[in-house]
Amino acid sequence: MDPSQHRFFSRRQFCLCCVTGVAFSATGGWLSPQQAYAEARNIVDLIRDDAAKAPIKVHKLRGNVSILEGSGGNIAVITGAEGKVFIDAGITASRPRILEAANSLGRDPIKHLINTHWHFDHTDGNQWLNQEGAAIIAHENTHKHLLVAQRVEDWDFNFPSSPLPAIPTETISSEKTLKLNGSTFHLKYYGPAHTDSDLSVAIPEADVFHYGVYPFIDYSTGGNIDGMIKAADANVAVVTDKTIVIPGHGNPVSNKAELSAYRDMLVAIRDNVAKLKRQGRSLDETIAAKPTAAFDARWGQFVITPAFFTRLVYQGV
Ligand SMILES: [Zn+2]
């Protein structure tokens, strides 16, 4: 386990996008899949509880770009005279600590918020950020999903519709370029991948690339495994060895090598599961064949349990 994973564990900071992050129990032992699933049912409450007390850690990257870590997904903050730009909103319970952390970077008001996708751990704070003065930009499907109640089947969770101030005020369908604070923001839609609302944000001046997705496939709102691989391919193609990569979850300061390893993991597991399914194996038989075994040490320890991810992939191949 590398130190960043340890930090992830010790703060009990789960990500919604990888629901089986809860497979490591509070008592420090591994949960059975049934236990993990039972805990996963309450993951929204767990994340809210965690965010209510977790400190917000500030990582200064390059130029005017920083990361706030500790409230749902990683939040990028880009400072400047045109007002702070936030990429993702974190969890509402963190509001005072997020404000304090953001103020430590400069006194400019928060004027813009970009949502990388509709999931709760990236949009829960939309309302208060809008009340602070942030206009919210997101993909049109984020707008659509926040407007009405959503059920995420694999979390077994029903989300109510969002209050009006939390709804994006500007939507994009494929690409958009913004110029703010001397930085360029290239917003790009992936197509259906982790959900059907995923955007990446590239900031070429600082050579920073932010993407919100993680290895959870949300079939309830249009996700699929091939789309996730396509998105991972697109991510690898647009970054260089010098690019600072900000994933939506986990180590907030990542790189191309980790992006590539993530893509290779998705491809290998999809191919292994598809082969077993073609051979006529049932879901249980496929899980028993351990199609994720080569990746469990690195990926199956905290972000996903092997059985849960196998089940998600099996549905879609
Ligand atoms: Zn997500």
Image (cartoon, rainbow, N blue to C red):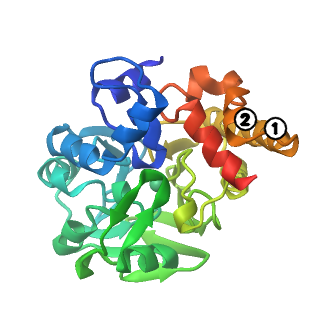
Percent coordinates x, y for residue 56 in the rendering: 22, 40
- Residue at the (75%, 43%) spot, across then down: 270
Q: Earlier in the sequence, mark 2 or mark 1?
A: 1
- Residue at the (26%, 54%) spot, across then down: 91
Crowding at mark 2 (Cα within 10 Å: few <14, some 14-19, many 20+): many
Percent coordinates x, y for residue 120 in the rendering: 35, 59
> Is residue 264 shown left or right of residue 32?
right
Reading the image, the residue beneath label 2 is: 286
What residue type is disc 1 on? Leu
Percent coordinates x, y for residue 10 in the rendering: 29, 24
Q: Secondary structure at mark 1?
A: helix
Q: Which of the numbered marks, if any, corresponds to residue 126?
A: none
Q: Secondary structure at mark 2?
A: helix
- Real-space Cα separation, disc 2 to disc 1, in angstroms: 6 Å
| Up-down relation of residue 147 to residue 290 (above or below) | below
- Residue at the (81%, 38%) spot, across then down: 276
Q: Look at the numbered discs 2 and 1 and tell me whether their residues touch, using CB distance below 8 Å.
A: yes
| Up-down relation of residue 123 to residue 304 (above or below) | below
What residue type is disc 2 on? Thr
> Is residue 117 shown left or right of residue 27?
right
Residue 210 seen in the figure: yes
Find residue 195 and report its image quarter. bottom right
**Does label 1 point to a residue whose CB lies under 8 Å from ligand 1?**
no
> Is residue 48 shown left or right of residue 254?
left
Crowding at mark 1 (Cα within 10 Å: few <14, some 14-19, many 20+): some
Q: Nearer the viewer, residue 89 or 202?
A: 89
- Residue at the (72%, 30%) spot, across then down: 291
Q: Nearer the viewer, residue 249 or 24?
A: 24
Reading the image, the residue beneath label 1 is: 276
